[in-house]
């Protein structure tokens, strides 16, 4: 459903939210190791998230990436998905057809519309802080 970049991006921001809670900044190597992503690919994803004002970064020997606790409570998964993958997951055709719409529906259009709406609601209502807390308390995992 999500691109590989989006999957890595979501994992990265969850990891950063947990680390940032303790005032830590994290470098690309540590992030890519923790989320099991190639470092160069992780850097490109984080660059998008910095431009999208999801992640902050500081250069220098004590630098790294972080997400403020205030932002982690405010930022939803929907924002991250939109920055990395655009809105196709919220508006796209379930079969990947370009011309699918309400007037010219594909065979899955009406059933898939409900799935998209549910997914959009879930992603909008889920904050980074909520996900990071699940990883921290052991009710969810981050790296497989």
Image (tube, grey):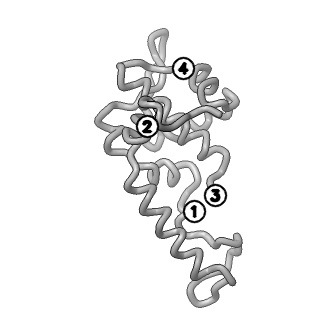
Q: Quadrant of the N terminus?
A: bottom right
- Marks 1/4 in contact by CB < 8 Å: the verdict is no
Q: Which mark is residue 36?
A: none
Q: Within 10 angstroms of label 3, few (less than 14), some, or many (20 or more) residues?
A: few
Residue bearing the label numbered 4: 27
Element marked by disc 1: helix
Distance between the alpha carbons at the discs numbered 4 and 2? 23 Å
Which quadrant of the figure has residue 107? Answer: bottom right
Q: Residue at x 43, y 24 (%)?
A: 19
Q: Say what secondary structure mark 2 lies in.
A: helix
Numbered label attached to residue 1: 3
Residue visible at 39% across and 25% down in the picture: 20
Q: Say if 74 sits above or below 61 in the image.
A: below
Q: Which residue is mark 2?
A: 134
Name the mark nearer the viewer: 3 or 1.
Answer: 3
Q: Residue 37: where, in percent of width, then height?
A: 67, 32
Sequence-wise first label, 4 or 2: 4
Q: Given the current orientation, which residue lies at the most extreme left position?
A: 70
Q: Residues within 10 Å of mark 4 (few under 14, many from 20)?
A: some
CA gap, disc 1 and disc 2: 24 Å
Q: Position of residue 25 (x, y in %)?
A: 44, 20
Q: Residue furthest bottom?
A: 103
Is label 1 or label 2 in front? 2
In space, the residues marked 3 and 1 are separated at their CA atoms by 7 Å
Q: Could you say where residue 77 lies in the image, as x and y percent from the top left? A: 45, 49
Disc 1: which residue: 89
Q: Is residue 125 above or below residue 92?
A: above
Q: Secondary structure at mark 3?
A: loop
């Amino acid at each position: 459903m999500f691109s590989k970049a989006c999957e890595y991006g979501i994992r990265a921001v969850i990891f950063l939210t947990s680390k940032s809670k303790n005032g830590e900044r994290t470098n690309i190597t540590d992030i890519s190791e923790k989320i099991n992503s190639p470092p160069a690919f992780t850097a490109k994803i984080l660059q998008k998230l910095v431009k999208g004002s999801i992640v902050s970064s500081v250069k220098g020997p004590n630098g790294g990436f972080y997400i403020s606790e205030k932002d982690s409570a405010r930022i939803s998964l929907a924002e991250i998905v939109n920055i990395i993958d655009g809105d196709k997951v919220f508006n796209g055709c379930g079969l990947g057809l370009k011309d699918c719409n309400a007037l010219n529906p594909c065979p899955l259009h009406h059933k898939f519309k409900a799935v998209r709406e549910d997914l959009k609601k879930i992603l909008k209502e889920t904050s980074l802080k909520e996900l990071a807390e699940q990883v921290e308390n052991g009710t969810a995992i981050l790296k497989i």
